[in-house]
């Protein structure tokens, strides 16, 4: 039974059905002879029922030993590739972008509140608004070039924050479309 499950997991990984990281973990556990968690068993059963069905179960039993060794070698190579990369995902970049958006947002909200005369920026500790200290660090010839376009550092911060918010909306829409497409076209990713 374990060999049959290994075959199914290898097939699911090769056809990119399901969460590849989780399937790789399940494959490693099965190959090591470990008992799967109930949640992993249920996950694997649902994937097998959805993507493999009775037709794959019949053909899986007819595979030769050489085919299985080839598939196992391919999966092992992919696992080593994942381990070398350290399971990096774009989540790190998104987290960094989120931090920058939050950082610019803090400055932008303070600028908007100052324009509405709710607070006075000069009364705030300069360490609370480090971007606004750039005009003290940047040489004046560069600032004069920026001021030519009727821009100041607070205006640039608000514009950059607005651009970042639009980028988040676009990213969200892209991921939503990818998710919907993956549900309606499971074979195309």
Image (spheres, rainbow, N blue to C red):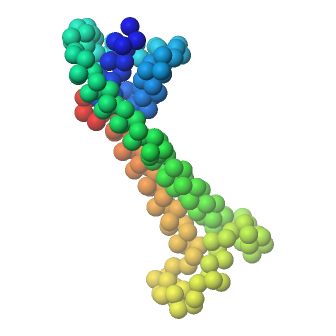
Give the camera-side residue of 130 and 150: 130
Q: Residue at x 45, y 18 (%)?
A: 30
Above or below: residue 46 compared with residue 72: above
Residue 184 visible in the displayed image: no
Q: Quadrant of the C terminus?
A: top left
Residue 23 in picture, x, y percent from top left? 41, 26
Give the camera-side residue of 40 and 84: 84
Residue 105 in picture, x, y percent from top left? 59, 59
Q: Quadrant of the N terminus?
A: top left
Above or below: residue 123 compared with residue 68: below
Residue 33 visible in the displayed image: yes
Circle count: 0
Q: Is residue 164 left or right of residue 64?
A: right
Above or below: residue 91 compared with residue 72: below
Residue 158 in picture, x, y percent from top left? 54, 66
Q: Residue at x 41, y 48 (%)?
A: 171
Quarter residue 61 falls in: top left
Q: Residue at x 63, y 83 (%)?
A: 137
Quarter residue 111 falls in: bottom right
Q: Residue at x 54, y 55 (%)?
A: 96
Residue 36 in picture, x, y percent from top left? 51, 16
Give the camera-side residue of 141 and 91: 91
Q: Is residue 187 left or right of residue 160?
A: left
Extreme residue in the bottom direction: 141
């Amino acid at each position: 039974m374990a060999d049959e499950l290994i075959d199914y997991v290898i097939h699911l990984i090769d056809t990119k059905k399901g969460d590849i990281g989780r399937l790789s973990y399940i494959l490693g556990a099965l190959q090591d002879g470990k008992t799967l968690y109930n949640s992993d068993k249920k996950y694997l059963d649902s994937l097998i029922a959805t993507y493999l069905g009775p037709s794959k179960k019949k053909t899986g039993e007819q595979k030769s030993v050489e085919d299985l060794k080839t598939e196992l070698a391919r999966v092992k190579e992919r696992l080593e590739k994942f381990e070398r990369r350290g399971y990096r995902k774009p989540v790190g970049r998104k987290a960094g972008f989120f931090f920058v958006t939050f950082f610019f947002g803090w400055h932008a909200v303070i600028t908007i509140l100052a324009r509405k005369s709710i607070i006075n920026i000069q009364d705030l500790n300069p360490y609370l608004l480090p971007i606004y200290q750039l005009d003290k660090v940047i040489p004046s010839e560069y600032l004069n070039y920026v001021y030519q376009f009727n821009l100041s550092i607070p205006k640039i911060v608000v514009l950059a924050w607005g651009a970042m918010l639009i980028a988040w909306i676009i990213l969200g829409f892209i991921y939503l479309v990818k998710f919907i497409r993956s549900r309606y076209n499971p074979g195309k990713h």
